[in-house]
Amino acid sequence: MANSKPAPSNSKLEIARLEVADIDAAITTIQLAFADDPFADWIYDRSKFSPKRNHASLTIRMKWGMRNGHIYVAHTPERRCAGVAMWVGPQPLEKKQSWDDWCQDWMLWFRQLGMNTRFGRGGLNVKRYYLWKESQAKMQSTVWTNPEGYWFCNILAIHPDCQGKGIGKALMNEVFDIADSEGIPCYLESSKFEPNVKIYEKMKFRFVKDIKCDDGEGTCTLFSMIRDAPGKAIDEESTSESSEGSGKDVDAIIDAAIPA
Ligand SMILES: CC(C)(COP(=O)(O)OP(=O)(O)OC[C@H]1O[C@@H](n2cnc3c(N)ncnc32)[C@H](O)[C@@H]1OP(=O)(O)O)[C@@H](O)C(=O)NCCC(=O)NCCS
């Protein structure tokens, strides 16, 4: 297939840009990878969780991501999805949103509105959703200091049968290569402290700060991490901590499992 290449750790897998035909398989992988995710447990009422609504939400998000971001999948020759990574490219911090991006955001919003009208909230705790978005925005305004912006990984999910085989790293390398050549750092918010922070440290991310979302009835924590561009000094203002010494408990999420 065009623009695809073998995943280094498994010659049967190909890594390629997501195509529309891959979306269903990619969503199945995301739903399985996040089935026991503590953030999803916090933000959803699991007894009311609607996989159908979540599927519709992720389909909208992926179609948006195909146009406005970079989505990579690792799949078998039969196109069974072993893993998926979705990235949004860097936006200079001072740059105003372009007209095209503004239109794309509104189109996304209208599609999500249509989905909510059709499927309802599917167990999503709306109050927690907005609390999370607010906490996330606050976090990013604190730790995003690079004027040229960040490559933001907001979905990384490896099928449970395929984890620990180098597929996550191979998927991430697709964007690391671009980011490193541009001299732009990468950013993510991990849904779990253990084992994910250690896994991301292997990919040269450093733990920066945690985001606590607490609505008075339950708390969840997200762990933000930055991967500096090679040769660029670490920002002195950042609040980077060692994962060894942080003593944080598990729990977290990324945009991935969330139907916005
Ligand atoms: C977290 C996740 C994306 C990692 O992808 P993966 O394919 O399992 O990870 P890889 O096999 O590429 O491992 C990358 C590195 O981490 C190491 N690693 C993998 N699992 C590990 C673990 N449980 N503990 C410590 N290190 C681990 C690997 O040895 C490798 O190190 P190396 O470069 O020295 O060889 C994947 O496990 C996953 O989808 N988990 C469930 C959903 C999730 O948490 N998504 C991420 C939300 S932020």
Image: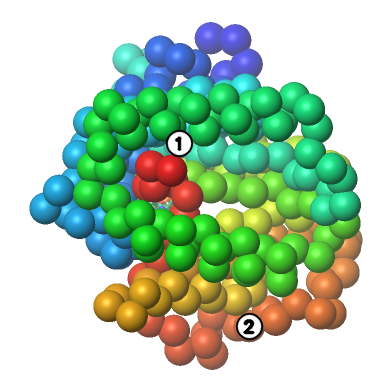
**Disc 1 versus disc 2: distance between alpha carbons?**
28 Å
- How many callouts does the rendering have? 2
Q: Where 42 sits versus 162, above or below?
A: below
Q: Quadrant of the C terminus?
A: top left
Is residue 28 at all visible to an observer of this figure? no
Say left or right for 233 vs 158. right
Give me the residue at 38% from left, 42% from top.
Answer: 259
Residue flagged by tag 1: what amino acid is it? Answer: Val
Which of the two residues, 162 or 188, is positioned nearer the viewer here? 188
Residue 42 placement (x, y as % from top left): 29, 64
Residue flagged by tag 2: what amino acid is it? Answer: Glu
Q: Which residue is mark 2?
A: 241
Tell me the quarter of the picture where residue 146 sits.
bottom right
Which of the two residues, 154 or 228, is positioned nearer the viewer here? 154
Residue 106 placement (x, y as % from top left): 60, 30
Dot 2 falls on a residue whose secondary structure is loop
- Mark 2 beta carbon near ligand 1 (under 8 Å): no
Q: Give the mark nearer the N terminus: 1 vs 2.
A: 1
Say left or right for 66 vs 12. right
CA neighbours of label 1 inside 10 A, class few (<14), some (14 to 19), many (20+): many
Q: Which residue is mark 1?
A: 84
